[in-house]
Image (tube, grey):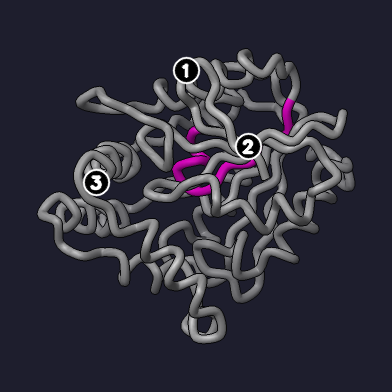
């Protein structure tokens, strides 16, 4: 695999197979490597993954970050690569960025896939995230807590290399830690815009693990109800990172979605 930097210092992977690209947006605190199961499965498609601002190898040096910064990053990257139409897939905060992008730049979208998306969080659910944010601000360890939410115990027992890989990604210091806090603060305090959602007519697939404690099936059902051209799939046994633990099921769902294997809601 060949990774590059564009003129804006976005770190990305692009594989051109002369089809509408699948563009993947990763979650907070992670990097584009989380999409390796999808890169392998869709290897015959045109693919684009990239590191969000302040994540992986993409730098960021402003004091705060907002959803518009992430939206502009994606638009600039697409323009730099001369990409006009995409199948957009976002995970967690990446799904929130994808929703914002789909609203602002509808002309780019062939399809939209939202994985593990928060929506209409209760104040208790929001406070749980803010509590973890406050721990992170104090440099308290939250990586092991994250792994419990993201993967089943059995999966981690059977795949110790995954545990080690993600612990290494999550254990940050210096500027990496500071940028993580900025993005996590945005995620913790993000407020849904129902009016925007109801104006997105792009064909949308909503995917959530049945056992995801933070981006729950209940949230996804409500999101499905509020998006006019969407459907919802619950991944049996999946937790937050079902795109890895249950990658076969998730990949098939994305493939069917992109191939127009369903009818618009009436």
In the displayed structure, does residue 72 sit left or right of residue 49?
left
Q: Is residue 38 above or below residue 265?
A: below
Tag of residue 13 = 2
* Residue at 75% from the left image edge and 57% from the top image edge: 251
Image position, residue 159 (x, y; %): 55, 79
Identify the magenta region: 86-97
State whether residue 107 appears in this view. no
Image position, residue 6 (x, y; %): 54, 21
Quadrant holding the N terminus: top right
Separation of residues labelled 1 and 2 (CA atoms): 14 Å
Secondary structure under the numbered disc 3 in the rendered image: helix
In the displayed structure, does residue 78 sit left or right of residue 257?
left
Mark 1, residue position: 8
Which label's residue is closer to the chain start, 3 or 2? 2
Separation of residues labelled 3 and 2 (CA atoms): 23 Å
89 falls in the magenta region:
yes
Separation of residues labelled 1 and 3 (CA atoms): 22 Å
Contact flag, marks 1 and 3 (Cβ < 8 Å): no
Secondary structure under the numbered disc 1 in the rendered image: loop
Contact flag, marks 3 and 2 (Cβ < 8 Å): no
* Residue at 73% from the left image edge and 34% from the top image edge: 87
Mark 3, residue position: 177
Q: Quadrant of residue 58?
A: top left
Which label's residue is closer to the chain start, 1 or 2? 1
């Amino acid at each position: 695999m060949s990774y590059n930097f564009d003129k804006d210092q976005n770190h990305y992977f692009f594989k051109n197979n002369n089809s509408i690209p699948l563009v993947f947006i990763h979650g907070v605190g992670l990097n584009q490597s989380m999409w390796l199961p999808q890169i392998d499965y869709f290897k015959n498609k045109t693919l684009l993954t990239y590191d969000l601002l302040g994540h992986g190898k993409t730098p960021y040096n402003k004091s705060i970050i907002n959803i518009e910064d992430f939206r502009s990053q994606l638009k600039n990257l697409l323009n730099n690569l001369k990409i006009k139409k995409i199948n957009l897939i976002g995970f967690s905060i990446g799904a929130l960025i994808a929703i914002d992008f789909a609203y602002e730049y509808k002309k780019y979208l062939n399809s939209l896939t939202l994985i593990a998306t928060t929506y209409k969080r209760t104040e208790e659910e929001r406070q749980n995230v803010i509590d973890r944010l406050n721990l992170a601000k104090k440099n308290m360890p939250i990586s092991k807590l994250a792994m419990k939410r993201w993967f089943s115990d059995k999966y981690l027992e059977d795949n110790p290399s995954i545990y080690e890989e993600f612990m290494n990604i999550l254990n940050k210091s210096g500027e990496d830690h500071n940028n993580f806090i900025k993005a996590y603060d945005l995620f913790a305090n993000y407020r849904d815009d129902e009016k925007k959602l109801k104006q997105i007519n792009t064909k949308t697939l909503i995917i959530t693990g049945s056992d995801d404690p933070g981006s729950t099936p209940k949230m996804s059902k409500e999101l499905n109800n509020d998006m006019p051209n969407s459907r919802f799939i619950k991944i049996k046994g999946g937790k937050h990172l079902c795109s890895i633990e249950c990658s076969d099921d998730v990949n098939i769902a994305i493939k069917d979605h992109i191939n127009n294997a369903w009818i618009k809601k009436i």
